[in-house]
Image: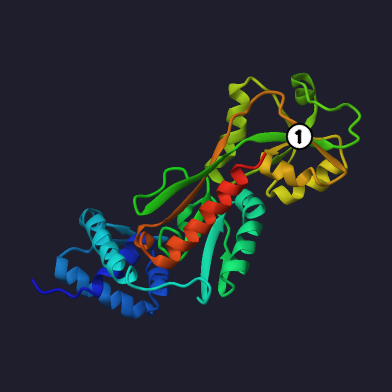
Amino acid sequence: MRYDLNLMPVFIAVMEERNITRAAQRLGMTQPALSNALARLRATLNDPLFIRERYGVRPTELAETLAPGIAEALANIDDVVLGQQAFDPSTAERLFTLAPNSFVEFVMAPALVSRLRAEAPGIRLRLTPFGTDLAETGVMSGTTALVLGRLIDPPDNLVVQHLMDEGLACVVRADHPEVGDSLSREQYERLKHVNVLPPGRLRAGLFQALDQKGLKREVAVSVTHFLAVPEMVASTDYCSTLPISICRRLALDPRLKVLPAPVDLGTFPVQMGWHLRYRHDPAHRWLRGIVAEVAEQIGTRD
């Protein structure tokens, strides 16, 4: 059988995006050109491959069967080609898109930018939100280089690396009328709390930890980002339970004081994920190495 290898990236783009328009944008094609390529592929394989639905397309059983093998073959080709390309961070000019969650953006991004400024001044970063759906970050399609945070049920085309584990502590205002140099279980349960809501299924994390310890918490207000916490806690008698690395930053604010949680609330993982096609790309490997080093430095601080 004779077939056009140029159709294989089209197949994978539609498979990963589940949307003809987004797949065309990703490949730099017009939508009619992609539709034409898809029609040729359907004729070659004698299968519709993708069925139109209200908000995109759904792969057929044959498409689902073929996708892993085609994706792996294209990744192997990328490995061979990209592995031959030299990369010098000191002279390279390149834009990387990262999707960090709010913790990583607050704690790790400044140190990462500092490293890049010193070692690779031509490398630019674009940060995009890590929302409720990994597909929306662009990492599953490869348009985003890295997703950083806690990754639950990652897809098969995502490589995941553990970066660090992070604990939890509490922050209240420095002149709190009820809290001194420590925070008892009774005080914690009596206080009202500021809660930071992470996206999607991650919302259950702290609540589950509290439930496992039998620790109650009355949430007075929920916010969407750690940056909203300092002013809110400094102007109230509220308490907030936050990652230790963020508490270290807030401890520099004289209006606030950081205290250990009244019970050990355990840790949560911080991970890094990337599309398997970038496994051996020299530039991506270098960037992942820098991110891992930054995470290690943060994770080993006292």
Question: Could you say which quadrant of the image residue 171 lies in?
Answer: top right
Report whether residue 136 is seen. Answer: no
Q: Where is 297 relative to 268, above or below?
A: below
Looking at the image, residue 131 lies above or below residue 165: below
Residue shown at 40% from the left, 78% from the top = 28
Residue appearing at x 38%, y 80% in the figure? 30
Outermost residue, left side = 1
Tell how many labels.
Answer: 1
Q: Position of residue 242 (x, y in %)?
A: 69, 39
Q: Is residue 44 left or right of residue 279?
A: left
Q: Eyeballing the image, is 3 above or below 236?
A: below
282 on left or right of 164: left
**Does residue 249 appear left or right of residue 234 in this picture?**
left
Q: Residue at x 62, y 31 (%)?
A: 207
Label 1 is placed on what type of residue? His
Residue 275: image location, x then y, percent: 39, 58
Residue 187 visible in the snapshot: yes
Residue 41 image offset from top left, x and y in percent: 21, 71
Name the residue carrying label 1: 193
Judging depth in this view, the residue of 216 and 116 nearest the camera is 116
Q: Quadrant of the C terminus?
A: top right
Q: Nearer the viewer, residue 264 or 58?
A: 264
Q: Quadrant of the N terminus?
A: bottom left
Please identify the quarter of the rendering in which residue 236 is found.
top right
Q: Residues within 10 Å of mark 1 (few under 14, many from 20)?
A: many
Query: What kind of element bears circle 1?
Result: strand
Front-lying residue, 47 or 163:
163
Q: How is the image coloured?
A: rainbow
